[in-house]
Image (cartoon, grey):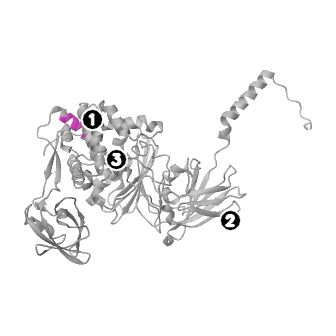
Amino acid sequence: MPTSPFPRPARRRPLLARLGLLWLGLLALSLGGHAQTPKPMIEYALAPQAPNSHLITVTIRYAPPEPVKRIDFALPAWRPGRYQIQNYARNVRDFTASDQAGQPLRWEKTDKSTWRVERGAAKEVRASYAYYANALDAGSTLWNDEELYWNGTNLLMYVVGQKALPARLSLALPSDWKCAYPLKKVGSPFLYEAPDYDTLADAPGIASPTLDIARVEHAGTTYHLAFQGPVSVPLSEVAEQTRRIVAETVTMFGGKAPFSDYWFLYHSIPGGRFHGVEHLNSTSITFPSNVFEERPQRFYSLTAHEFFHAWNVKRIRPQVLGPFDYSQEVYTRNLWVAEGVTSYYDDLLCRRAGVISVEDYLRALATTIAAQQRTPGRLVTPVTAASFDAWLTPDDSNVRVDFYTKGALVALMLDMDIRRRTDGAKSLDDAMRWLYATYAERGQGYPENGMQLAVEAVAGASYAEFFAQYVDGTAELPYGEYLAAAGLELVESRSPKQPKASLGVELAGDEKQTVIANVFPNEAGFEAGLDRGDILVAIDGEQANTATVPELLRKRQPGEVVKVLAFRRGKLREMSVTLQKETRADFQVRPVSSPSAAQSRIYQAWIGQLPTRS
């Protein structure tokens, strides 16, 4: 039957029904209008050039919905986790800008890290540049004939004022390459999305044809372990040890990780160094290829350190560390919490997980104490000041303080004291959980006195004096007093071959040329006039270098006077040095012979095993 060219009139609904539908429509418009207009997506495309050029072409496409005349593209000047200005823009070259049709747009560079593009009538602005990528550490970017490895803060510019916009990243790589990348994959072979620039920049990636990936599960989260480079033990063994560390850490923070996937990105480098950088749901780590033969504890400690950062600093963070201002320094006095407290927990979590022995843990703790006691700056610079000035490296090494090392030891003392005050009912673990629940789970950073507030909340006592002395002050850390809570004692240990006498200097170099690298304040060499940079020649007429000085000093006693010959600025100098007692001792942390019941309870809860005295 043919249809009529004149449609039949629709039946009219009752007035109330029509008003109801109108109201529902307006309500839907008001509630869902924004959802119906999705945010513009900023598109990133990475296209590596010839491998031996080490150049990566980065193209950014942005279609601004608002009528702006110009758009600024900026590259971060630093990266979270490394509190120093890095000036990544030094590696940018060949910047160009065009519209959606490929027509050039005018641009100018307004400062060292910002490129301003005149939009004109363009609906879409495309910025393109080449980035020189030839560095390999945990926070760098590398392109060569073996892999593409990138950190977003090095490589990817952001649209100034639009970091909250979602982003999509594509990689122009052979389809048979493997990719380890913690962002959501939305297309094949290599297409990923992030909800905003901060998430994009905080996600490192490795793409390679030789990538090895192992996976383990714990409490509903998948953990991916990606290795680029040789590994001398089965990946299944590394994965199982890592799973135990993961389980111990997740249990400490309530049993459920705040992510469904987590990526450990490892580079095994022959002759390489240990280095790690934390990210929101991943970490990038480099290590020497022989680590499993020589220093497996160091590998697992670093793994534990970076994984603990997924809570402490990525979520439990100072207020200023997010959202990030990538253009300039961001100051906090709490890097001793971010890094030092994490350093305290890395070996401890390995011990609790059974990855390292009690003996190895206590030995590592003693080594940390010895390192702190050999730092002259401990008597000069508070750990909060060292945190605030992390952006600076003083030329005078005698005022430097490592907030990793001292922060770890302050955390140890806090942990022992909370356990002692509460008879083992509470610990520093509770303080970390308090910070997590009070600030992190609400999406907030903690205030500058956040750690003190947390400790006082769980211990039920004031820690004003403790923080004044050991955190904001430079009082010596009384390790033994606090270790006693767990039935431990700190004992100086010296090798029989260690000289009893000392010049009070630090040497560097070799048998051909030995240089005085540091002169410790107010010690023997300082009082005699020795200086940094002096080339050591002889002690009492005998050749002095890094190999012979220990033997020369073993023949002498504190208080003896020796003649030291050294070249300074091309002239030979002779100085009389009154030798001092060697004060740089090693230490041993060990259980006392007869711990009390309270000490044994605290020890077992802290370290995960009953005390034994060897």
As drawn, the label of residue 418 is: 1
**Which residues are drawn in magenta?**
599-606
Image location of residue 5, percent across then percent down: 92, 38
| Apparent side of residue 331 relative to residue 466 in the rendered image (left or right) | right
Can I make out residue 561 in this image?
yes
Image location of residue 201, percent across then percent down: 50, 53
In the rendered structure, which amino acid carries the disc numbered 2?
Pro
Q: Residue at x 85, y 29 (%)?
A: 10
Q: Nearer the viewer, mark 3 or mark 1?
A: 3
Q: Nearer the viewer, residue 133 or 338?
A: 338
Q: Which residue is mark 3?
A: 384
- Please report whichever mark, 3 or 1, sits nearer to the chain's N-terminal start: 3
Q: Nearer the viewer, residue 184 or 56?
A: 56
Q: How many C-alpha atoms fall within 10 Å of the one at disc 2: few (<14), some, or many (≥20)?
A: few
Question: Where is residue 188, by image quadrant?
Answer: bottom right
- Above or below, 275 relative to 473: below
Q: Check disc 2 and report its element: helix, strand or loop.
A: loop
- Please report whichever mark, 2 or 3, sits nearer to the chain's N-terminal start: 2
Q: Residue at x 24, y 38 (%)?
A: 416
- Please report whichever mark, 2 or 1, sits nearer to the chain's N-terminal start: 2
Image location of residue 302, percent across then percent down: 33, 52
State the separation of the CA atoms marked 2 and 3. 50 Å
Q: Residue at x 45, y 37 (%)?
A: 441
Asked if disc 2 and disc 3 are in contact, CB closer than 8 Å, the reply is no
As drawn, the label of residue 104 is: 2
In the rendered structure, which amino acid carries the disc numbered 1?
Ile
Q: How many C-alpha atoms fall within 10 Å of the one at disc 1: few (<14), some, or many (≥20)?
A: many
